Amino acid sequence: MSLSGWSSTATAEETSTRSDAARPRRWLQAKLVAAKNRHATTVAEIPPLKSTVELTNDAIVARMEAGKKRAVVEVLHRRIDRERDDPRRLRSEVALEQMVLVRHQVAHALQLAERAVAAETHGLALA
């Protein structure tokens, strides 16, 4: 018997039981430490990833704004082209109307001349 009153085999059993109980605790502590390390690594990776995402989002927004600006510029170019065509079209319409007016005036002058000739012929015939 040992000094504690237990036999040496009982003390050996107690020791093995204590070490068996400590094994899962050490295993869990190791798992906890590993999980904390992974967590710290993940937390350290967040700012660069966040920065990359923000840069990507900014680039996408910039591309979208550039596309909108290009579309607006294209619409304005088309409108300017139409506006340039409008005065040309208006000038050609005015020229056409002037030609028609001149033709009407010539036709009216011819009618008056024909009437004058007819009146003179009639006057000569009566004389």
Image (spheres, rainbow, N blue to C red):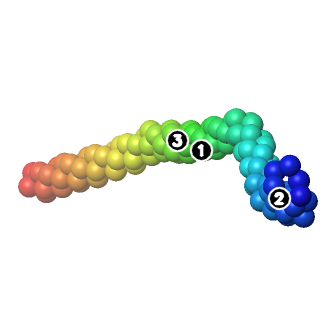
Which quadrant does the N terminus fall into? bottom right
Identify the residue at horizontal 40%, vertical 43% (top origin): 90
- How crowded pointer 3 is (Cα within 10 Å; few <14, some 14-19, many 20+) is rated as few
Secondary structure at numbered mark 2: loop
**In the figure, is residue 116 to the left or right of 75?**
left
For residue 88, above or below residue 21: above
**Circle 1: residue type:** Met
**Could you say which quadrant of the image residue 98 lies in?**
top left
Q: Nearer the viewer, residue 59 or 127?
A: 59
Identify the residue at horizontal 74%, vertical 40% (top origin): 40
- How crowded pointer 1 is (Cα within 10 Å; few <14, some 14-19, many 20+) is rated as few
Q: Nearer the viewer, residue 115 or 67?
A: 67
CA–CA distance in space, label 3 to label 1: 12 Å
The percent coordinates of residue 112 (x first, y second) are: 20, 48
Query: For mark 2, what is the residue?
Result: 6
**Circle 2: residue type:** Trp
Query: For mark 1, what is the residue?
Result: 64
Query: For mark 3, what is the residue?
Result: 72
Which mark lies nearer to you, 3 or 1? 1
Which mark lies nearer to you, 3 or 2? 2
**Circle 3: residue type:** Val
- How crowded pointer 2 is (Cα within 10 Å; few <14, some 14-19, many 20+) is rated as few
CA–CA distance in space, label 1 to label 2: 84 Å
